[in-house]
Image (cartoon, grey):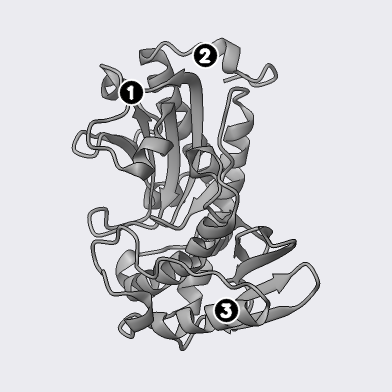
């Protein structure tokens, strides 16, 4: 049995009810900064130009090119006094605190800081695809809750999940996305591709058409939402082949959700496992095997030669 103190350090509890207001504020902060990367980073397929990445301090945009210079925006979620640091390649920087600001205040400080650093670029100042708010960033004074301890827990979990996903990514030698953090739904995600194009779903929007232009099996982790009331690992396939959700899942706590068309493994079950890493890897591999089998992927050709199931 895993030592409980080590488990709680690496996989701390994250009950959504205890930090939901903070979670929503953080989500909006992430969208403000994410839209800057979306506006400026050179376009890549499958929207790979928009996500953040796990860093030793929190979440980062990585270097963003702008008119002959580069700058980076990093959320420091590790150290006391959480803050967004904006730094240019020339060494100039500005810092925006995360605690004590409403979304409106954060939005104003981010763009005034960018302007001071010579980055003059606007964004569409509206939340994207959030059912719980449509308030423009500049007038959102409602969302201002920020509990540093819970945000730090969330980041520490992301650090562990990122490492597990990197291991899983290495088992597959076909086309794969990076392990990246999408500020759209605040999920850490990884996608495998068969190499075959996929039909566009009728009614798909611009984001969906680009994200699902090819046959994929996608995996992720997020902290929960209005419908899933707790952190969870998820996985799905597009297009979904017949019999996909009839296949077995591992570990035994994992389950299919016909309503969502996805597989789930709740974070609390991962926390309780003898090996949290093995539980997650077993889940990811079981969904991959289910999808690859039902859609006739060449499983052996995509397998890293040194990997033994």
Q: Earlier in the sequence, mark 3 or mark 1?
A: 3
Residue 6: where, in percent of width, then height?
Answer: 59, 58
**Which residue is at 40% across, 14% downward?**
293
Tag 2 residue: 299
**Which residue is at 60% across, 65% downward?**
58
**Residue 82 marker:** 3
**68 vs 233, nearest the viewer:** 68
Residue 220: where, in percent of width, then height?
Answer: 44, 44
Q: How far apart are marks 2 and 3 (CA)?
A: 44 Å
Q: Which of marks 2 and 3 is nearer the N terminus?
A: 3
**Residue 199 marker:** 1
Q: Quarter of the image holding residue 17?
A: bottom left
Q: State yes or no: discs 1 and 2 in contact (Cβ < 8 Å).
A: no
Q: Earlier in the sequence, mark 1 or mark 2?
A: 1
**Which residue is at 44% across, 65% downward?**
31
Would you say 26 lies left or right of 239 here? Answer: right
* Secondary element type, mark 2: helix
**Which residue is at 56% across, 63% downward?**
9
**Residue 216 marker:** none
Q: Distance between the residues labelled 1 and 2?
A: 22 Å
């Amino acid at each position: 049995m895993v030592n409980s103190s080590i488990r709680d350090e690496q996989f701390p509890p994250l009950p959504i009810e205890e930090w939901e207001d903070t979670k929503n504020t953080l989500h909006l902060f992430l969208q403000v900064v994410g839209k800057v990367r979306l506006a400026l980073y050179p376009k890549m397929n499958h929207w790979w130009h928009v996500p953040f990445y796990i860093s030793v301090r929190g979440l980062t945009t990585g270097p963003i090119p702008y008119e002959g210079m580069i700058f980076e925006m990093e959320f420091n979620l590790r150290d006391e006094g959480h803050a967004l640091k904006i730094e240019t390649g020339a060494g100039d920087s500005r810092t925006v605190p995360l605690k004590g600001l409403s979304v409106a205040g954060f939005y104003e400080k981010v763009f005034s800081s960018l302007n001071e650093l010579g980055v003059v670029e606007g964004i569409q100042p509206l939340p994207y695809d959030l059912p719980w708010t449509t308030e423009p960033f500049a007038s959102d004074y409602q969302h201002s809750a920020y509990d540093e301890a819970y945000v730090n827990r969330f980041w520490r979990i992301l650090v562990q999940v990122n490492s597990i996903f990197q291991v899983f990514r290495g088992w597959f030698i076909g086309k794969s996305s990076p392990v990246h953090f999408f500020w759209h739904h605040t999920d850490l995600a990884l996608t495998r591709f068969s190499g075959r194009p996929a039909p566009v779903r009728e009614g798909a929007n611009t984001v969906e058409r680009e994200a699902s232009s090819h046959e994929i099996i996608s995996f992720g982790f997020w902290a929960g939402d209005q419908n899933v009331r707790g952190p969870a690992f998820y996985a799905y396939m597009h297009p979904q082949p017949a019999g996909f959700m009839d296949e077995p899942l591992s570990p035994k706590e994992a389950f299919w959700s016909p309503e969502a068309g996805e597989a789930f493994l709740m974070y609390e079950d991962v926390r309780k496992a003898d090996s949290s890493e093995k539980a997650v890897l077993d889940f990811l591999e079981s969904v991959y095997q289910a999808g690859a089998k039902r859609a006739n992927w060449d499983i052996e050709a995509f397998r890293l030669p040194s990997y033994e199931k």
